[in-house]
Amino acid sequence: MTARRKAIILASCCLSLLIVSMDATIVNVAIPAIRADLHASPAQMQWVIDVYTLVLASLLMLSGATGDRFGRRRVFQIGLTVFALGSLLCSLAPNIDTLIAARLVQGIGGSMLNPVALSIISQVFTGRVERARALGFWGAVVGISMALGPVVGGLLIEVVSWRAVFWINLPICLLAIVLTAIFVPETKSATMRHIDPIGQGLAVLFLFGVVFALIEGPGMGWTDPRTIGVAVVAALAFVVFLFYEAWRHDPFVDLRFFRSVPFTSATLSAISAFAAWGAFLFMMSLYLQGERGYSAMHTGLIYLPIAIGALVFSPLSGRLVGRFGARPSLLVAGVLITAASVLLTFLTATTPVWALLVIFAVFGVGFSMVNAPITNAAVSGMPLDRAGAASAVTSTSRQIGVSIGVALCGSVAGAALAVPGADFAAAAQPLWFVCIVLGVVIFALGVVSTSAWGLRSAERLAPLIAGHGPQSEPVHVT
């Protein structure tokens, strides 16, 4: 395994991260164009984003386990192929329902990429220093993709059409498939946890039920039998999930993790931060292009402060966590997300561009500060053999947060989505008050999770779960 081959393997894995991360911002910029071209309703616009993030959230942990069992390279290549197929179908969609179905296919492929790619990196880069460098490069790609997404997306929409934002995935997927076939060794775990199809199914039923009720409720009516029926089914699925997972010897999600205050706080912080993030991206794209009349390219440029914030402050947050623990980064994140949300409540149809850039910068810096402490808090006090499972729950929570944030846009600010050209800023105001609450929650959890009481709860948990999960797994490499 030469240094050159390792570098190519890292590049192959990072290509998958590039397309999945870029997709988060690039499709949001395209939403107004999709609405105009395919005559999408408010609920359908939300489903274009949410069906993708929901499938990611539902299948991330399963895909990681599947890669461990059947071969990481194989699952990674299948994921790239399915993602490319989904992207092609998105670009060819003749109507909005077909686009939503194609986004579902894209989500299935995307779920097989990042968790499996991280596993490949962990197996190839075994030295502590080289692994830290590889993961640092991986983190930098997130910032690069956030920077590229809105600008590249805006340019493609303006020069070609919204369909071009999906074409860009095709050559990247093809290059990653070829490099993976030539350079990435096949690895699989000799021992691994059992797959829990019932727990997985109950979790999916709960997630889709909640988001369906939030998205379709405003249109169907909150008292409509279908809305109530789906909400009841989601609640029952959640209750059964809790009982079933508590009873199962090798559960899909080990509920004992939630006895750790830092872990529970990390999960709730991830959901809160990414809900605010999902709502912000979705609504601001509609505001900038709908109410303000900016082009897709101008919209992409206004998003740039978020990307710059990610490039600068994400690594800074990581260093702060390493030196001072999770508290400073979480408190800063909570304060800045709250402050940006407060500023958004004053938004009007004539807010100056410089003020918009300030809001985007404040929100971007706050959001970029939150990832490192969430990951750190999730694995705080966990035995080494359970750290992977704990961080996987947090990764899933991020996608759940985005899904809920986008779904709340219709539930809380439905008037802003319903009529293009209406007083969008005023109609969106209730949503920003929700985001203020989410920012305060992040701040409060930052205090509680890093308190002496919180840290003691993590210490008490470690002996309870040590040795009960999958042990450090021998790896077969071919």
Image: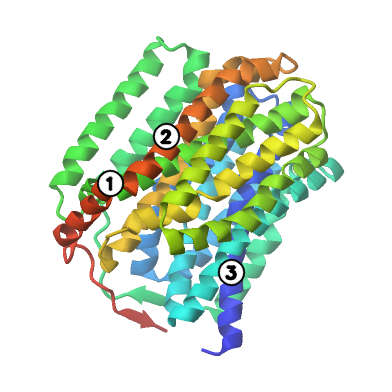
Instruction: Look at the numbered discs 1 and 3 and tell me whether their residues touch, using CB distance below 8 Å.
Output: no
* Earlier sequence position, callout 2 versus callout 1: 1
**Which quadrant of the figure has residue 144?**
bottom right
Reply above or below: 344 against 393.
above
* Residue at the image position 32 percent from the left and 58 percent from the top: 380
Q: Residue furthest bottom?
A: 2
Report the residue marked by disc 2: 441
* Residue at the image position 68 percent from the left and 20 percent from the top: 425
Dot 1 lies on which element? helix
Q: Position of residue 367 (x, y in %)?
A: 56, 45
Dot 3 lies on which element? helix
Dot 2 lies on which element? helix
User: Which mark is drawn over residue 261?
Assistant: 1
Q: Disc 1 or disc 3, which is closer to the eye?
A: 1
Question: How many marks overall?
Answer: 3
Query: Within 10 angstroms of label 2, few (less than 14), some, or many (20 or more) residues?
Result: some
Query: Within 10 angstroms of label 3, few (less than 14), some, or many (20 or more) residues?
Result: some
* Residue at the image position 40 percent from the left and 17 percent from the top: 227
- On the question of residue 62 being in view, the answer is no
* Earlier sequence position, callout 1 versus callout 3: 3
Q: Residue furthest right?
A: 159
What amino acid is found at the position of numbered circle 1 in the picture? Val
Residue in the foreground of this view, choosing between 79 and 347 = 347
User: Which mark is drawn over residue 140?
Assistant: none
Reply above or below: 143 against 405.
below
Instruction: Look at the numbered discs 3 and 2 and tell me whether their residues touch, using CB distance below 8 Å.
Output: no
Report the residue marked by disc 3: 137
